[in-house]
Amino acid sequence: MSAQVEADVRTISPEMPAMFDGMKLAAVATVLYVIVRSLNLKCPTAAPDITCQDTPLNRYLLKSCPILTKEYIPPLLWGKSGHLQTALYGKMGRVKSPKPCGLRKYLPMPDGATATFDLFEPQGVHSTGDDITMVICPGIGNHSEKHYIRTFVDYSQKQGYRCAVLNHLGALPNIELTSPRMFTYGCTWEFSAMVGYIKRTFPQTQLIVVGFSLGGNIACKYLGENPANQERVLCCVSVCQGYSALRAQETFLQWDQCRRLYNFLMADNMKKIILSHRASLFGMSSSNMEAADLSRLYTATSLMQIDDNIMRKFHGHNSLKEYYEKESCVHYIHNISVPLLLMNSSDDPLVHQSLLTIPRTLAEKKQNVIFTLTLHGGHLGFFEGAVLFPQPLSWMDKVIVSYANAICQWEKHRPQCQ
């Protein structure tokens, strides 16, 4: 009996390693497949998809900004994943971010609020020799101290631009609110106050309006609200905005592209900002907030719940639908007559593809609009690099400054350009 068992063992043993090796290979192959699929390593790189009318200005801009028509190449190992581009932007902002020196300005608002912005003087002469100021509106809950803003400001300064960066009301942790109100999705009051200050203080300057994400909505809404707001404005650039909050809210409840998870994370960040100003927002006698609103804030798990219970009440909107309708630039953007560059990424996990019909249709109908859609870039990522490590300056930074430079040259030498 013992001899028989030994014979069976000797018969089976040589086959066991081969079977385990096969299982290991299968596991490795599965992991590699998941990595390749999740990182989109097989996805090709391509030049941005451009939508615009055939006009002398647009032909000049595309010729003067070759970066718009050349292939955008993200870092090879992770740059084709919109999630990783977005996560790196959110966590790190930029690589080796500079620290430009500016002056913080405080502007009293009619309702008792105090708007703040940071002013950065140019570090050289602009290529046209003119005085040009970039007025910049950051993304949701952002301010001038964010890494991606610092990187863009430093690059713009070196190109001869003065930069004014709005600090969203309540976004700076060390600045107390002076009224029971903070920034909202589309309130343009603070941005308008900053632009007005720049126009009064520098009567010879011309303006380049730049908005990132939520800031793009505010910038476009500001320009479209009143034709007078476009005076002395050379152009506007909007990056990674969603155009319509009403249409976007439906997509934020979907699990597609993990959008529901992003919704939860952004809501958690908004809760922290609101609660950091709890005394001002809920304690002042002029506040519209009640104790029940604070209780609902603690249990909120989405931006829509926070908007409905807190944000819409800052401006007295009767419903969430009314709030989103009134504060979305989609109802104002068609009034913009200055050159307008709208930039989005196909793999942006925060902006659903259905929302991109808005800028595409606008560019097809209006001569002053160029819509640029990249294959990769995520939400405000647009990192560039060879294999693993990204470059300090992003593709987005280069495009904005290149477009602004071309617009300035066109205005300076319009007869020759035409």
Image (spheres, rainbow, N blue to C red):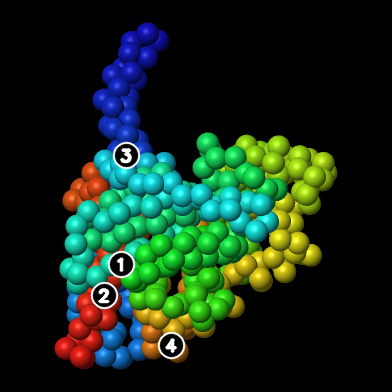
Residue type at the position of mark 2: Cys
Q: Real-space Cα distance between discs 1 and 4?
A: 26 Å
Report the residue at 20% width, 91% height from top.
415
Residue type at the position of mark 3: Val
Residue type at the position of mark 4: Lys
Report the residue at 16% width, 88% height from top.
416
| Residue 355 point in image, percent of width and height | 52, 71
Instruction: Between residue 287 and residue 221, name the one nearer to us.
Output: 287
Q: Name the residue under label 2.
A: 408
**Vertical placement of residue 34 versus 323, above or below:** above
Q: Which of marks 3 and 4 is in front?
A: 4
First of labels 1, 2 by sequence position = 1
Residue 126 shown left or right of residue 340 in the figure: left
Q: In which quarter of the image is the N terminus?
A: top left
Callout 3–callout 2 Cβ contact below 8 Å: no
Q: Quadrant of the C terminus?
A: bottom left
Q: How crowded is mark 2: few (under 14 residues within 10 Å), some or many (20 or more)?
A: many
First of labels 3, 2 by sequence position = 3
Q: Name the residue under label 3.
A: 28
Q: Name the residue under label 4.
A: 366
Callout 2–callout 4 Cβ contact below 8 Å: no
SS assignment at label 3: helix
Q: Real-space Cα distance between discs 1 and 2?
A: 9 Å
Q: Nearer the viewer, mark 2 or mark 4?
A: 2
SS assignment at label 1: strand
Q: Please state the total of marks drawn on the protein image.
A: 4
Callout 1–callout 2 Cβ contact below 8 Å: yes
First of labels 1, 4 by sequence position = 1
Q: Name the residue under label 1.
A: 132
